[in-house]
């Protein structure tokens, strides 16, 4: 069951707890309902998100007690043999439930949900950790129950791990209390309505980590060095010709390695990138002042830390502060711009890892980009396009003419080399140049670091720009930088799994020795106004603010928003507003993310207040809802068929009672959303969805029926959430899954046919790739993909494309694919 809205992308919120590695009086306690606790009858559930400690500490995470009832319950955590051990105890008596989960599994998730359910009528308690099965045990409980909930230190329970907590909720279908934990200062715990319902002691508010850059460590090198972030290992490498320093972001561990054999290449500026396919870190230079014979590109094996000389080819041109980006699917490094010998460049260059040679295409096609340096580049993981932002230079490319600052944005299609200018801003105050590395997590925003390079002592600021029109804002506080030397540089990375922006600031005072300082900021970052938007007792500003912030969680296509007009009817499409001209456009980032139902990827429901209520849908309620929803285009689903599908073995009288309970529960949960209800007419149930509510499945179906391009961003935004009805493996959904898959396969096949007829090779390849994502063993998709690569003269990728297909074919079919690459490629090349 899903308890979060894409946990990797939820903005920094919650409390960080100090545990047993600190004196007792400094350990954290978060006490909810110390007075006037709310009574629950029948049952109630606690849900919260947890992040494990990195210091191997163990102890009590949460304690639940009732003033009038003796049993006290606690959840204990410890580590055993690379496993996380959770014990739900009846305090002072016995352990009721134990859960033993591989530690790495939980750390890989970064945040994971915990659910503790109390059934007061049956006298039972249940525990579910992350995606593990729910476990139940008998417990001494009576109804009503008014719980006091304390996380961390509680009275004499002083053994506390160092963990982090967020998204705490308690309640049942009748009432629930939500704690967004979005405070940034003070010791009061507010619910979502702004009421004070508890107190925290010695806690650190995580919202600050989305505004204040956290400084991790500084490292030093006495010779020219390179620096890179490795998202695979969550590690920073600070490397020179003789040694390597490694810093692990999650654990804070640092180690140094001295090479047995030094780097064969002479370091000058230490340009670098990582090739994840071969797990190697590359360093390269574009120019040497004095005559130089030797490698100009070398790579380091990141497993055994041995060097390999790669090439002695180089551009023979000084390209200081050029922009670069490694394209793993092309096995090429792209370099753009740069400055040297009083000349600015606007050349596009490639270093090919296969041929080990530098090359320069005939030139960009489309909108010209003026010569410049201090420019920055990034690539969208959604459309694959490259984005180039800003810099300094001039039209002639000659430094003697004088330079100007650019605040413009271009896209470059790596398939065609076509460039397009998106916008150009007039910027007169607080001049800055972009640091290396644009972060582009979705189709709405790009994030970048900028600083005034003309000042010796200055500060780096994080800004985000709208890809659509260049609207921008500053986020977070600032990072100091000493920018007096050409080798000084900063670079921005984004780790979606950690939910962090990572900044590497490398400074030098003589262009030889340097200092590397590592910073991180929780993503999405916030501005100063959001940092201080404390809850108030009146509460009118709290929930809209929470909803707006959730709408700002733009880390992925999952929450790309589009506008359009749709009529109210049974099962309509998204409730989206109009642009004046009636065309579709991206919704503003402040639009509330409300009344949403997602059936692609994890089952997710967002209510009218912008809160994730997916946890209120048990497996049974998900099944009831989906069965009704999928039949609602017609007369609906009959009560008899619904009963037969879900309770085939129950007696008729008990089936009726179970069905009634399920329908009533479903209606209660759906009442948290506007624009959707379950109606019963003529013995059939139907879901009536108005224009205020959005369902991704229906949106996809309606738009494809209306002729929308299957490769449009709107459609891909739905599909890239993940598999349809992910995790719902009951055979009752096989038919709808097959029907949906057939609909997508047919649409992609039609797109391939049209693209092939139009000789649009880029589009043909994209359609073939997406079809293989839906149907990995689809041979026509393989053939069309290779045909597109052959006709489009993109020979650098066919073997990789074939290998991905053959590997998936073997995994799915249990046998090797019977046609060799040479055979398929020869046929496709005709």
Image (spheres, grey):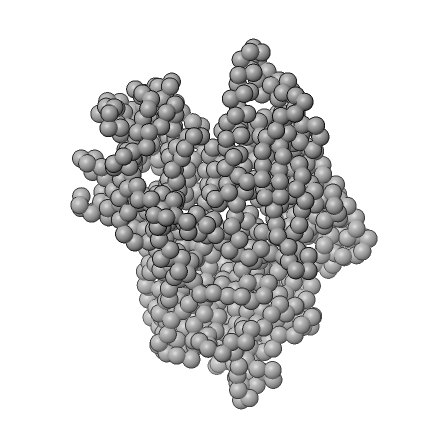
Residue at x 43% of width, y 35% of height: 130
Q: Quadrant of residue 230?
A: bottom left
Along the viewing direction, whichever of 257 and 533 lies nearer the viewer: 533
Q: Position of residue 700 (x, y in %)?
A: 66, 43
Say left or right for 584 vs 251. Answer: right
Q: Position of residue 756 (x, y in %)?
A: 79, 52
Say left or right for 360 vs 553. Answer: right
Q: Position of residue 54 (x, y in %)?
A: 32, 46
Q: Quadrant of residue 730?
A: top right
Say left or right for 659 vs 175. Answer: right
Q: Is residue 395 above or below residue 298?
A: below
Along the viewing direction, whichever of 274 and 770 lies nearer the viewer: 770
- Label count reads 0
Q: Tell which residue pokes out farthest to the bottom in this image.
A: 400
Residue at x 25% of width, y 37% of height: 34
Along the viewing direction, whichever of 423 and 636 lies nearer the viewer: 636
Q: Quadrant of residue 634?
A: top right
Residue at x 55% of width, y 33% of height: 727
Q: Is residue 565 visible?
A: yes
Along the viewing direction, whichever of 669 and 384 lies nearer the viewer: 669
């Amino acid at each position: 069951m899903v308890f979060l809205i894409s946990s990797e992308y939820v903005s920094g919120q919650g409390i960080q707890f100090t545990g047993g590695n600190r004196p007792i009086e400094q350990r954290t306690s978060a006490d909810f309902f110390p007075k006037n606790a709310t009574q629950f009858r029948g049952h109630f559930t606690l849900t919260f998100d947890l992040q494990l400690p990195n210091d191997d500490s163990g102890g009590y995470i949460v304690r639940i007690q009732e003033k009038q009832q003796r049993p006290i319950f606690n959840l204990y955590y410890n580590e055993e043999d690379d496993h996380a051990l959770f014990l739900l105890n009846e305090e002072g008596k016995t352990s009721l439930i134990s859960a033993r989960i591989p530690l790495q599994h939980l750390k890989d998730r970064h945040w994971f949900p915990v659910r503790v359910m109390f059934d007061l009528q049956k006298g039972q308690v249940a525990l579910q950790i992350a995606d593990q099965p729910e476990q139940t045990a008998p417990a001494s409980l009576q109804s009503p129950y008014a719980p006091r909930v304390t996380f961390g230190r509680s009275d004499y329970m002083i053994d506390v791990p160092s963990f982090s907590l967020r998204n705490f909720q308690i309640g049942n279908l009748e009432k629930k209390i939500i704690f967004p934990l979005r405070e940034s200062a003070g010791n009061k715990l507010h619910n979502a309505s702004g009421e004070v319902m508890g107190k925290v002691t010695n806690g650190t508010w995580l919202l600050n980590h989305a505004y204040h850059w956290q400084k991790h460590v500084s490292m030093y090198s006495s010779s020219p060095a390179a620096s890179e972030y490795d998202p695979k290992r969550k590690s920073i490498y600070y490397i020179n010709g003789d040694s390597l320093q490694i810093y692990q972001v999650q654990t804070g561990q640092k180690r140094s390695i001295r090479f047995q054999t030094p780097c064969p290449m002479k370091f000058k500026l230490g340009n670098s990138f990582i090739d994840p396919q071969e797990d190697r870190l590359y360093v390269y230079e574009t120019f040497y002042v004095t005559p130089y014979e030797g490698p100009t590109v070398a790579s380091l094996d990141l497993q055994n830390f041995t060097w390999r000389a790669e090439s002695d080819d180089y551009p023979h041109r000084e390209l200081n502060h050029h922009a670069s980006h490694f394209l793993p699917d092309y096995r090429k490094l792209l370099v753009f711009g740069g400055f040297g010998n009083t000349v600015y460049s606007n050349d596009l260059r490639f270093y090919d890892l296969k041929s080990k040679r530098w090359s320069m295409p005939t030139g960009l096609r489309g909108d010209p980009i003026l010569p410049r340096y201090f420019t920055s580049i990034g690539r969208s993981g959604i459309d694959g396009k490259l984005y180039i932002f800003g810099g300094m230079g001039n039209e002639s490319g000659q430094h003697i003419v004088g330079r100007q600052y650019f605040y413009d944005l271009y896209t470059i299609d790596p398939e065609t080399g076509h460039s397009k200018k998106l916008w150009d801003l007039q910027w007169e105050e607080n001049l800055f140049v972009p640091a290396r590395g644009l972060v582009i997590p979705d189709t709405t925003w790009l994030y970048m670091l900028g600083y005034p390079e003309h000042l010796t002592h200055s500060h780096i600021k994080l800004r985000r720009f709208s890809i659509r029109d260049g609207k921008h804002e500053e986020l977070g506080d600032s990072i100091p930088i000493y920018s007096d030397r050409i080798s000084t540089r900063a670079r921005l990375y984004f780790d979606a799994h950690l939910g962090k922006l990572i900044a590497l600031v490398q400074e030098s005072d003589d262009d030889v020795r340097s200092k590397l300082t590592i910073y991180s900021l929780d993503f999405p970052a916030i501005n100063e106004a959001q940092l201080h938007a404390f809850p108030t007792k009146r509460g009118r500003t709290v929930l809209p603010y929470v909803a707006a912030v959730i709408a700002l969680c733009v880390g992925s296509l999952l929450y790309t928003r589009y506008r359009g007009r749709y009529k109210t009817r049974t099962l309509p499409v998204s409730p989206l507003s109009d642009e004046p001209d009636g065309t579709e456009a991206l919704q503003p980032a402040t639009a509330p993310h409300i009344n949403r139902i997602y059936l692609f990827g994890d089952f997710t429901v967002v209510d009218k207040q912008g809160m994730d209520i997916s946890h209120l849908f048990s497996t049974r309620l998900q099944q009831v809802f989906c069965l009704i929803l999928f039949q609602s285009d017609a007369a609906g689903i009959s009560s008899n068929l619904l009963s037969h599908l879900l309770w085939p073995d129950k007696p008729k009288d008990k089936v009726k009672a179970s069905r009634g309970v399920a329908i009533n529960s479903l209606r209660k949960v759906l009442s948290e959303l506007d624009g959707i209800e379950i109606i019963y007419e003529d013995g059939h149930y139907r879901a009536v969805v108005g224009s205020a509510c959005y369902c991704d499945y229906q949106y996809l179906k309606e738009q494809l029926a209306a002729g929308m391009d299957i490769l449009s961003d709107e459609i891909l935004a739905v599909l890239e959430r993940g598999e349809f009805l992910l995790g719902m493996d009951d055979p009752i959904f096989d038919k709808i899954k097959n029907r949906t898959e057939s609909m997508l396969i047919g649409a992609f096949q039609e797109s391939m046919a049209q693209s092939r007829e139009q000789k649009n090779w880029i589009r043909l390849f994209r359609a073939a790739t997406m079809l293989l994502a839906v149907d990995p063993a689809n041979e026509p998709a393989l053939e069309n993909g290779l045909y597109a690569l052959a006709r489009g003269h993109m020979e650098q990728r066919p073997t990789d494309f074939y290998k991905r297909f053959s590997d998936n074919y073997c995994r799915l079919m249990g046998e090797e694919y019977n046609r060799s690459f040479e055979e398929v490629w020869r046929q496709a090349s005709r």
